[in-house]
Amino acid sequence: MRQTPFLLLGAGLLVQFCQNPKQVPVIEAKPIEPAVVKFACRGTSPVLWLVDIYPDSIVYERGGGKKLVYLKRMEEKKGDTTVFNTRMNLYEKESKMTIKIIPDSCSVSHDAQKFPYTVIVERDGDVLNGCALGADPK
């Protein structure tokens, strides 16, 4: 019978929200469509990081932490360099990220594999350098 007060509280809240549906917060989120990665960016300095650029989103992960999905972005060409600018609200602050994809041969220090692009990621004051694979930007 200890559960009775919680059940009554829950029922009361349900009745309240049904009477005032405008009080129920509605969160609209665009689902991420499965797509081919436009660029796969990787680096190891100062820690392992990755940025995958899709046609409709950018996925950022650093040091094996949480993957962050930036849904809105702008893409522009500056000479041979492709620049992606994006931002989102993260923990009640604005998070900004700029990704520069430069067509220049690159290799990660511990790997002999050559990549066709050098990448510079600037995110909230941090600068990360690495390499990228991807489609030729158009």
Image (cartoon, helix red, strand yellow):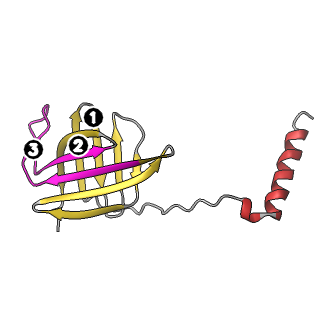
| Residue plotted at (40% across, 36% down) | 65
**Which corner quadrant of the image does residue 33 belong to?**
bottom left
Q: Which mark is residue 61?
A: none
* Residue 66 % position (x, y): 42, 40
Q: Which of marks 1 and 2 is nearer the N terminus?
A: 2
Mark 1 Cα shell of 10 Å, populated few (<14), some (14-19), many (≥20): some
Q: Which residue is label 2 attached to?
A: 42
Density class for disc 3 (Cα within 10 Å; few <14, some 14-19, many ≥20) is some
Query: Residue at (6%, 48%) from the top-left corner?
Result: 105
Of marks 3 and 1, which one's residue comes earlier in the chain? Answer: 1
Place of residue 36 in the rendered image (x, y in percent of width and height, measured from the top left)? 29, 61
Q: How many labels does the image show?
A: 3
Residue 82, located in which quarter of the rendered image? bottom left
- Identify the magenta region: 95-123
Kind of element beneath mark 1 = loop
Residue 133 magenta-highlighted: no
Q: Name the residue under label 1.
A: 48
Horizontal side of residue 106 vs 72, given as left or right: left
Give the labeled residue for mark 3.
106
Q: Disc 1 residue type?
A: Leu
| Whether label 1 touches label 2, CB < 8 Å | yes
Q: Distance between the residues labelled 2 and 3?
A: 11 Å
Q: Quadrant of the C terminus?
A: bottom left
| SS state under label 3 | strand
| x 20%, y 46%: residue | 120
Observer-nearest of 36 and 24:
24
Q: Distance between the residues labelled 1 and 2?
A: 8 Å
Disc 2 packing (10 Å; few <14; some 14–19; many ≥20): many
Q: Distance between the residues labelled 3 and 1?
A: 16 Å
* Amino acid, disc 3: Cys
